[in-house]
Amino acid sequence: MRALIHSTFGDPAEVLEVAERPLPEPGPGQVRVRTVLAPIHNHDLWTIRGTYGYKPELPAASGTEAVGVVDALGEGVDALSVGRRVATGGTFGVWSEYFVAKAASLIPVPDAMSDETAAQLISMPFSALSLLDFLDVQPGDWIVQNTANGAVGRLLAQFAAARGVRVLGLVRRDGGVDDLAALGIDDVVSTEAEDWRERAMRILGENAPRAAVDSVGGSAAGDLLSLLGEGGTLVSFGSMQSGTLQLSAGDLIFKQATVKGFWGSTVSRTMDAATRGALFAELVQRIGSGEVSLPVEAVFPFEQARDAVTASGAAGRAGKVLLEF
């Protein structure tokens, strides 16, 4: 089979290449899946660069989420059948024509769901919904987040709205406000405007956010903290701009604020089965009903992975870039 690999860590647009690899055989409790579509996520690209929490041995496979069709069954697998469409959001090495995964880790895809939606069903939506659950907010509460036009930001806003939670979104350019409005996501402010803080306060009115989600780091984290209500929680979700948080000691002390980190892999691994099941059921229901959308920006043949990576990094992208196998 053919697969996308990298022999060195570096810019994915420069180091990704197509290589021949042995066709994997499923072991006990495993299935082999023929890949159909796979999205490009930031964490996939960070792994290829060698800057993520997981650093594979070289030469390394790539990709973690995909939709495909069960191609072969390992010993003891009876819950799935050959020909069944399935999705995975945590199987390393899915950027290949075939991959092997534990049967219990795969999600059967509803017949009415398109491949384009199923390909991105788990990683970002489950991260966003898990994050919302982690924030422990109730209907009527407010959340404030930056990078509101990112994949998780858009999903968090949609899942929150479905639960009756209000979200104030911050974006770094004026065009991001219009992009989100086109998706039905309002209450968004561009920090490009000098009076962005006043605009944010007008949206909040007398309300103070109970939680804030920072994906930027640096002074942006401090901006969120300044908007947070007394006893609120600031969650560090990413560090697009800086690996440090610039926070006001006064805001921390007088607001009695709590600062936490959120890493989806750890949260998912330690989550109890009942909570996981309930979140997945909500995820499929919300996406299936159209309350939450998973738009696609473009689909590239996997042989054009370098071009796809470049497209994935383009400013103003409205949906995921997918690889077709």
Image: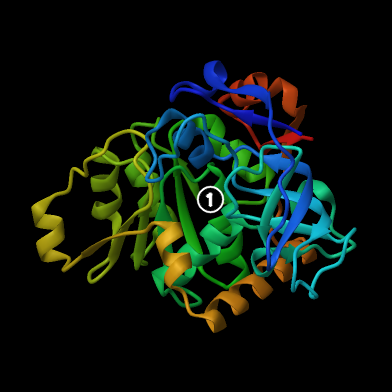
Q: Image point 43% across, 74% down: which residue? A: 137
Going by the image, does 216 lie left or right of 138?
Answer: left
Task: Give the SS element for disc 1.
Answer: helix
Q: Quadrant of the C terminus?
A: top right
Going by the image, does 104 lie left or right of 70?
Answer: left
With respect to residue 235, does 81 lie above or below? below
Q: Image point 23% across, 71% down: which residue? A: 231
Q: Tell me if residue 209 can be seen.
A: no
Q: Quadrant of residue 10?
A: top left
With respect to residue 87, does 104 lie above or below? below
Q: Image point 56% across, 84% down: which residue? A: 274
Q: Nearer the viewer, residue 261 or 70?
A: 70
Task: Kindly give the residue lying farthest to the top in the view shown.
Answer: 14
Q: For the residue carrying disc 1, how many other residues have a C-alpha within 10 Å: few (<14), some (14-19), or many (20+)?
A: many
Instruction: Provide the residue designation for mark 1.
Output: 152
Q: How far from the left and from the top, in percent, is residue 162? A: 63, 69
Going by the image, does 118 lie left or right of 279?
Answer: right
Going by the image, does 250 lie left or right of 304?
Answer: left
Q: Quadrant of the N terminus?
A: top right
Q: Nearer the viewer, residue 276 or 193?
A: 276
Q: Nearer the viewer, residue 73 or 228?
A: 73
Q: How far from the left and from the top, in percent, is residue 72? A: 82, 57
Q: Amino acid at mark 1?
A: Val
